Image (spheres, rainbow, N blue to C red):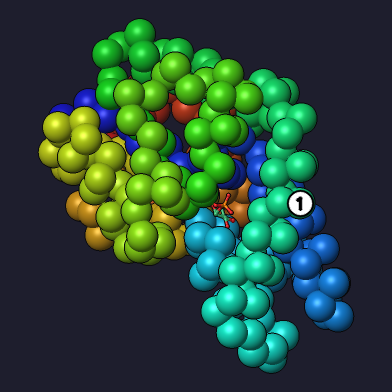
Amino acid sequence: KINTCIFDLDGVLVDTASYHFLAWKRLANSLGFDFSESDNERLKGVNRMSSLKMILDWAGLSKNENERSLLAEQKNDWYKTMIRTMNSSNLLPGTEAFLEELACSDYHLAVGSASKNAEAILQKTGIRHYFEVVVDGNMVSKSKPNPLVFLKAAELLFVDPKACAVFEDAQAGVEAALRAGMKVIGVAESANLLGAHGYVTGLSEMNIERLESIING
Ligand code: B16
Ligand code: MG
């Protein structure tokens, strides 16, 4: 029986993908190359340093470790300036209603995000109090598709991974959840997410009844 829901942050609870995109694009442009929305799509759920390595790779640029950390810091400074003004209007539709319904039904709730800015974003958007546990990029070294981020959440909640349902919008995240032995609900507008146990276009389509029907096939 599922008694725990673990949520990815970016693209599931809040809409920060557009800010990541603008910050990466600015960085790419400053290095003399372009960066498209479809490039950005491949970075979803991937942590900051791995994202940077992929971008440099696509551009055919090689940078040493010191240069890479300066570039990542620059991107993060721009990103942090953009998220400074976030508030509850940046929550994706249906987020609060679904969290509220789960909380009232005694589900354990956690966040499993690659982002090192997760705590700040949860505070700003006013939903931090729903989560018993927030596992983010500061707590795990291995990025999705490694299952560590979700396994850590289950461990901190003292729940069996088999009792967990993960909500994910990124392919790397779906893979991480499957490897953790958890149920996965894909959150995606198009049919480009593979392997999940069920799909919704957003949390506004979710309620506990739908969750149970997806989980029980
Ligand atoms: P930061 P998620 C991920 O968040 C984003 O999808 C990904 O695009 C980003 O690079 C990563 O967080 C790291 O974020 O630079 O803030 O540490 O989808 O796992 O919630
Ligand atoms: Mg995501």
Closer to the camera in the image, 90 or 76 = 76
* Residue at (85, 72) in percent of width and height: 29
Q: Quadrant of the C terminus?
A: top left
- Crowdedness of circle 1 by 10 Å Cα count: few (<14), some, many (20+)? some
Closer to the camera in the image, 120 or 57 = 120
**Where does label 1 land, which residue?**
78
Q: Quadrant of the N terminus?
A: top left
Instruction: Say if residue 140 shows up in the picture.
Output: yes
Report how many numbered discs are placed on residues in the image: 1
Residue 173, quarter of the rendered image: bottom left
* Residue at (52, 16) in percent of width and height: 97
Is 213 left or right of 129, judged from the image as shown?
left
Instruction: Say if residue 184 shows up in the picture.
Output: no
Q: Is residue 16 above or below residue 38?
A: above
* Residue at (56, 61) in percent of width and height: 48
Q: Is residue 204 above or below residue 151?
A: above
The percent coordinates of residue 152 (x first, y second) are 25, 45
- Residue type at numbered disc 1: Trp
* Residue at (14, 32) in percent of width and height: 158
